[in-house]
Image: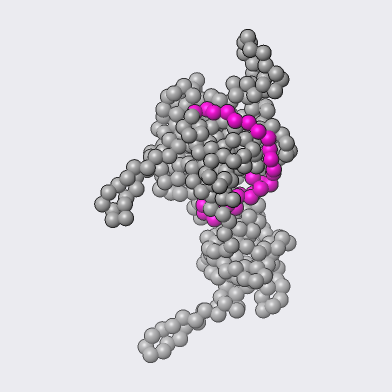
Amino acid sequence: MNARFPCRPVVLPFACALLCGCGHGAPTQRDGRPQPQDEKIAVAPAVPPPVVVALPPVQKTDVELSPEEETNVRVYSLVNRSVVNITTRSVQADDFFFAQASRQGSGSGSVLDKAGHIVTNFHVVEGAQQIVVNLFDSSSHPAKLVGADPNNDIAVLQIEAPDEALIPIGWGDSEKLLVGMRVFAIGNPFGLDRTLTLGVISSLGRTMGTENKRTIRGIIQTDAAINPGNSGGPLLNRRGEMIGINTAIISRSGGSSGVGLAIPSNTARRVVEELIQHGRVIRPDLGIASVIAAKNGLLVHRLVPGGPAQKAGVKGPEESYFKKGGVVYRYTDRSRADLIVALDGKAIRTLDELLTEVERHRPGEQVTLRVRRDGQPLDIPITLELAPE
């Protein structure tokens, strides 16, 4: 089966390719995005406490509701005004650059605070020249991109709107989920705003590939119906707390087939707080520019000059030059390069595994890289630095 974003296909994880300092910054081709000052960065807390939301009573009506229906109505009453419809517009030139075609897209998002911050998927706003957020009161507001993290398919927007039109959503704790729990999804499938669907958590701990060939781990699987336009909308527990961000479906036809995927709230919240504070996610840099997949690990292909790995003594290929017939040739001896086999005692076989392990740490922390050099194991302590944007 094919995994698809409700707006576009998901790219499955890749085997191994280029490693750029173990840090991938958010796109810089957006207007209105603050530039971070790296030397003054304050690290956001690892897992902020969840926001507890009190569910309002169901309005008295002449309709008799079952206890299950009361929960459904109460969750929708609490959260539906926090969910927004996002429309985007971009202009693309044809193959000969003679004509330009306007491309439109849509998705969902959630209001985070009274400052007008909105969380959505990165793929909803990727490449957009114009972003408009439509609130529950039918008002439309131009949005600027505060920051984005393609690695986790998350973006934060900001709008200017009256306080009474901004109804913040509450965060839930995705570490406290169990398979079988009832969940609710609210979004804008096919442009039908603030649509409620419900189901259960079908599985936990799934993985999903992103378009920049990274893997998001801890993904929530649900059978709540998710369709095109649901991307970026909240997945909720019965308390009305956001425990995930709906991002993809697995489908043969491109429509809902009962297998929806959501980014866990604890991952999303860490990313969101850094995007709001710095405009990007603060990631550590190992200082290895690229690697090559090998039989038992990753062969160091290129080091960042003056980077953490080079300063710690990690070795890349040896290069030599010779002249023949008036032409200078370069010879690269990869047999002299270190073979990465583990980091902090955990075996490394793929680029994604290396990136994932490095990103468990913060800049300034020390990791131990185990390599094989001349056939012998060697442990090299490396102090991680701040990854370039």
- Judge whether residue 213 is colored magenta: yes
Looking at the image, which residue sits at the far front? 253
Q: Tell me: residue 145, above or below residue 343.
A: above
Nearest to the observer: residue 90 or residue 34: 90
Q: In the image, residue 331 lies at what x, y percent?
A: 49, 81
Residue extent of the magenta highlight: 193-219
Instruction: From the viewer's perspective, tell me whether residue 324 is left or right of residue 223.
Output: left
Q: In the image, residue 249 lies at what x, y percent?
A: 57, 43
Q: Residue at x 56, y 25 (%)?
A: 80
Nearest to the observer: residue 305 or residue 344: 344
Quarter of the image where one finds residue 64: top right
Q: In the image, residue 336 lies at what x, y percent?
A: 60, 78
Q: Residue at x 67, y 21 (%)?
A: 69
Q: Residue at x 28, y 56 (%)?
A: 96
Quarter of the image where one finds residue 355: bottom right
Q: Residue at x 44, y 32 (%)?
A: 133
Nearest to the observer: residue 370 or residue 307: 370
Looking at the image, which residue sits at the far bottom? 325
Instruction: From the viewer's perspective, tell me whether residue 104 is left or right of residue 42.
Output: left
Res. 136 in view: yes
Q: In the image, residue 40 lies at what x, y percent?
A: 53, 46
